[in-house]
Amino acid sequence: MTRIAIFVLAGLVLAAAPAAAQNQGQTGAPSSPMGSSMPQGAPGDTPASGNMGQLEHMSETEKFAFERSGSDKAVKFAAKAQAFITGSADERERAMSVGRDAQAGKPFDMSGDDIRAALEADLQDWRKTFSIPKAQFQSIHEQLVPAKVELTAAEWAVRRAQWFQARDKWIDDQRALLGIPAGG
């Protein structure tokens, strides 16, 4: 099961890569209030170099809007993430409880098919909410819900609990990339 968690986290890192690339700042670039670096023109153009690329041709209003685009993205992500976490809190708690019971060998009230279907729904909700690219989603989906693998109800329960842990870490990683304080 540890191997599955590692594969899922690796897949989530891949899903986060486009966001990381968008929010990678240049050394010496001024930061917005949310902590993400101001977008630059050509690679290597920084305020320190005196070459601001496309920014040098913008009006002050356009520059302000351009600089704020990163922080606006952070604000939108923070709101979306909080709504998603709040909306899925009951499902997450149930999955974690069933996962703990399964690991402890205690009985629980869900069949393997029900847990698999719930995991499938969790994944689809995450994909739709955060617009995860199809190829990256399919890679994660194939690791968590393989088509030709028979698992016991307990194994599905543990897998679903691991998914919620990996999902929470992915959200925290996205927040960090956007300069959003943890829990924000």
Image (cartoon, rainbow, N blue to C red):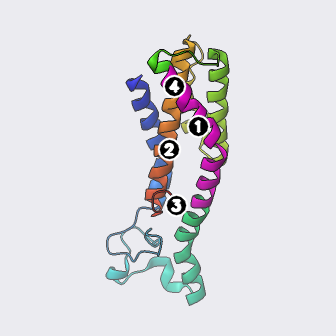
Q: Earlier in the sequence, mark 4 or mark 3?
A: 4
Give the Cα distance between marks 2 and 3.
13 Å
Give the Cα distance between marks 1 and 3.
19 Å
- Residue 19 among those drawn in magenta: no
Three-letter residue code for mark 4: Gly
Image mark for residue 168: 2
Q: Which marked residue is nearer to the observer: mark 4 or mark 3?
A: 4
User: Going 44% across and 43% down the picture, which residue do you hit?
Assistant: 13
Residue with the most extreme bottom position: 60
Question: Picture coordinates of residue 57 (x, y %)?
Answer: 53, 85
The reply to whether residue 4 is in sight is: yes
Seen in the picture, residue 175 relative to 61 is either above or below; the reply is above
Quadrant (top left/top right/bottom left/bottom right) for the N terminus: top left
Dot 1: within a 10 Å radius of its alpha carbon, few (fewer than 14), some, or many (20 or more) residues?
Answer: many
Give the Cα distance between marks 2 and 4.
16 Å
State the residue position of label 4: 99
Highlighted magenta segment, given as a residue range: 78-101
Q: How many numbered marks are there?
A: 4
Dot 4: within a 10 Å radius of its alpha carbon, few (fewer than 14), some, or many (20 or more) residues?
Answer: many
- In the structure shown, which secondary structural element does the residue marked by tag 4 occupy? helix
